[in-house]
Image (cartoon, rainbow, N blue to C red):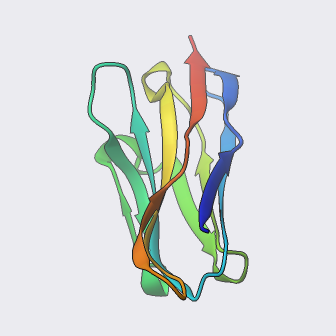
Amino acid sequence: QVQVVESGGGLVQDGGSLRLSCVVSGSIFSIAAMGWYRQTPGNERELVARIARRDRTDYADSVKGRFTISRDNAKNTAYLQMNRLKPEDTAVYFCLAERVATPDSFKDYWGQGTQVTVSS
C-alpha cells in the first residue's frame, strides 16, 4: 500500500523560512512527478510547485523566486524550500505523487497535509 506523508510545517514569522518534506512509501516502481499544493478555508486547492521527470519544474507565479522544489528519486522524496515567507502563504500544504507505479496499480496519491502558518 502506498503512503504519502508530509512533514516540516509549522509557525514562522513573516520573512522566515521552512522546508517541507514529502515521503512516498510502499512497493513503488516509479513516480512520474511530485507536486506541492496548498489550500485555505473556502478555497480550492492550488498548485504551488511541481517537479517532473528530468527535474522539470513549474511554480505558481506567487512563489517564483522564493520557493524551490527538489526531489530525491532514490528516496521517493520531494522537498519544498520556502524562503521569504509571507502571511498570504498561510495554508495547508499537500503533496501529490503522480502516476505512481506499483505491482497492483498506476495512479495518483495525496498526502494528508501539513499546516504552514506565517505570522505578520
Query: Residue 72 at what x, y percent from top left?
Result: 67, 75
The answer to whether residue 37 is above or below residue 116 is: below
Left or right of residue 74, residue 15 in this image: left
> Which residue corresponds to the image point at 51% horizontal and 39% vertical from the top-left?
93
Q: In which quadrant will I find the N terminus?
A: bottom right
Query: Residue 20 at what x, y percent from top left?
Result: 65, 48
> Which residue corresponds to the image point at 58% horizontal and 89% vertical from the top-left?
29
> Which residue corresponds to the image point at 50% horizontal and 32% vertical from the top-left?
92
Residue 2, quarter of picture = bottom right
Does the rendering let one see residue 103? yes
The answer to whether residue 112 is above or below residue 101 is: above
Residue 50 or 76: which is nearer the viewer? 76
Q: Residue furthest top?
A: 120
Left or right of residue 88, residue 116 in this image: right
Query: Residue 109 at what x, y percent from top left?
Result: 46, 61
Q: Residue furthest front?
A: 104
Badge count: 0
Left or right of residue 49, residue 46 in this image: left
The answer to whether residue 53 is above or below residue 45 is: below
Q: In which quadrant will I find the C terminus?
A: top right
The answer to whether residue 100 is above or below residue 8 is: below
Does the rendering let one see residue 56? no
Residue 85, quarter of picture = top right
Left or right of residue 99, residue 117 in this image: right
